Structure formats: structure tokens, C-alpha cells
Amino acid sequence: MKNGVKKGILVSSIIVIIIAIKLTGLDSYLTFENLQRNKLVLRRLVSDNYILAASGYIAAYIIAVAFSLPGAAILTIGGGFLFGVALCAVYVNAGATTGAVLAFLFVRYLAGDFVQRRYADKLIRFNRDISENGHSYLLMLRLIPVFPFFMINIMAGLTKVPLRTFAWTTSVGIIPGSLVYAFAGKQLDTIGSAGDIFSAKIFIAFTLLGLLAIFPAVFNYAKGRMRRARRG
């Protein structure tokens, strides 16, 4: 089967899945209001069949992240309520990392190679920088909760960042946010809305973590500039 046909089948399959999710309304079900309304039913489901519930939770997270569906934050809050902070963080990490890797691979297979070939000359310097500091950039982007999660998956797929680097930086970078949302889920009865979770202090803390992650890249850049200045 030709490569173009394979890509066409993959794109068609993704479109069909997204349309099916939209038609069934699954994407609009992941809201804070629905979580509050159904929390007792969900807790009973977990109590009756924990293994099935945990497996379904991870699968739902993979699908939400892989297809860039809204509601991942609500899933994490719900996980904190249903499974506790520690186990929720583990389940979220497994689901979010797997889903992000799938999205990354989709983009790389469908468009990444084309972009790299089409703009090879213009991307030489960029690719060299990614090779040296890509892990720092990705960690910063994951840690600072300003950058959309799905956009990082897409943009990384267009670069030459190694899959292993993308996977481990995603896994490590989402831990702080997962813990915050999971802890909020434990306090579900006292939270009025999802917006009540992130305070200014938490946002500043995440920003500082992101700046710490990017520091090695900035240091290497400055050191390179100084070395070139001495040669000049």
C-alpha cells in the first residue's frame, strides 16, 4: 500500500472518530457541572468495579488527549475525587502521556517529514537548537499552564525532537498540574467552579518551574554567544 493511501486512511479514520465523538456529545459531557451532578454515581461505579473504572478512566484520558478534545482538566479533577491524589496522578500521567505521544506521532507521520523536507535549509539552525535544548523547551512548555497542551503536541510533531525526549518531558512536566487538579478533586464539594482551582500563587509557582526548566538552554545560548564573541 502506498504511503499516500496509508496517510489518507489515517486522516479519514481520525475524522470519523472526531465526528462520532461530536455526534454522540461525548466532548460536551466533560464539564464541571456534569461532574458535580454525577459524582455520587461515579463513585459508586468505582466502588463496584475498581479495575474496570480505572482502566476506563485511563482510556478516556488517552482519547481526550490524542484527539485534542476539551475536558482533560475536568477528567483530572474527577480522578482526584474518585481515586485520590496519588493514584489519580499516576493514572493521568499514563493516559495523558500516551495520548500526547499518539497525537505527536499522528502529526509527525502526516506532516512532520514533509515540513522538514520542504523547509530543510531554513530549519538547519532551528533543528540544531532543538537537538541541544529541546528537552528544556518542552519541559518549560509543559510546566507553565499558559500554552495549550494539544498545541505543544502538534508543534513538537513538526520538529525533529526525539520521541523519547517528547515522552519523558511530557510525563515529568505534567506532574505538578496533575497534582493540583487531583487535589482540587478531593475538595470537590467545596469548589464552585473549575476556575477556582488556579490561584495567582499557583500560577506563579508553575511559571517559576518553567523558567527553571528553560535555564539550561538560556545558559548554553549565552555561553555560545560569549565563545563566538571571543573568536570574533
Image: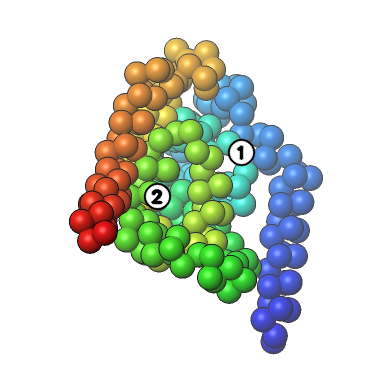
Residue at screen point 61% across, 22% down? 33
Question: Where, by quadrant of the figure, is residue 50 drawn?
Answer: top left
Q: Which mark is residue 138?
A: 2
Circle 1 residue: 70
User: Is residue 52 among what the camera can see?
Assistant: no
The CA distance from mark 1 to mark 2 is 21 Å
Q: Position of residue 66 (x, y in %)?
A: 57, 53
Nearest the viewer among 25 and 170 is 170
Q: Which mark is residue 183?
A: none
Q: Position of residue 188 (x, y in %)?
A: 45, 20
Name which of mark 1 and mark 2 comes first in the sequence: 1
At label 2, the amino acid type is: Leu
User: Is residue 28 among what the camera can see?
Assistant: yes
Q: Is residue 47 left or right of residue 3?
A: left
Q: Position of residue 138 (x, y in %)?
A: 39, 50
Residue closest to the far right: 23
- Mark 2, secondary structure of its residue: helix
Residue closest to the far bottom: 1
Question: Where, by quadrant of the figure, is residue 227 drawn?
Answer: bottom left
Nearest the viewer among 119 and 227 is 227
- Mark 1, secondary structure of its residue: loop
Nearest the viewer among 110 and 24 is 110
**Above-or-below relation of 106 to 81:** below
